[in-house]
Amino acid sequence: MQEIESTISKYLLLFAMNVSENIKQTIGVKYLALYPDAQSDKLISHYKDMGFNVLNKYWLVVKLK
C-alpha cells in the first residue's frame, strides 16, 4: 500500500486553492486568506511552508496564480 505524503490540512488547502482558481475566472479572486485555529505557531509554520504569508496579527494570505 502506498502512503499518502500529505496531511489532511494540506489536501484541503490545495483543494481550496484549486477551487479558488476556478472561481477566479468568474469573479476575479486574487487572494486566498485563512485564519489559523488558535493562532498555533506550529500550524502557522505549516501554512507558511505551503506558501502563505502573514497578512496581519491574525490572518495569513496567499496570492493565487
Image (cartoon, grey):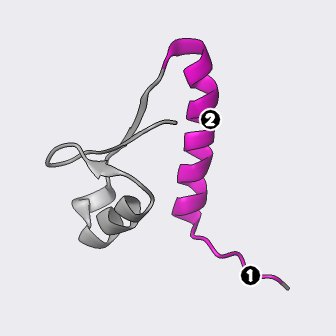
Please name the residue that numbered disc 2 is placed on. 19
How crowded pointer 2 is (Cα within 10 Å; few <14, some 14-19, many 20+) is rated as few
Query: As drawn, which residue projects farthest toward the left?
Result: 57
Would residue 29 be counted in the magenta stretch?
no
The residue located at (16%, 44%) in the rendering is 56
Residue 19: horizontal and vertical position, in percent?
62, 35
Instruction: Kindly give the residue lying farthest to the bottom in the view shown.
Output: 1
Does the magenta portion include 13?
A: yes
Please say if 1 is above or below 15: below
- The circle drawn on residue 3 is 1
Considering only vertical position in the picture, is 16 above or below 50? above
Label 1 neighbour load within 10 Å: few <14, some 14-19, many 20+: few
Where residue 40 appears, x then y in whole percent? 26, 66
Residue under the image location 41 percent in, 54 percent down:
51
Q: Main secondary structure of the magenta part?
A: helix
Mark closest to the chain's N terminus, 2 or 1: 1
Q: Secondary structure at mark 2?
A: helix
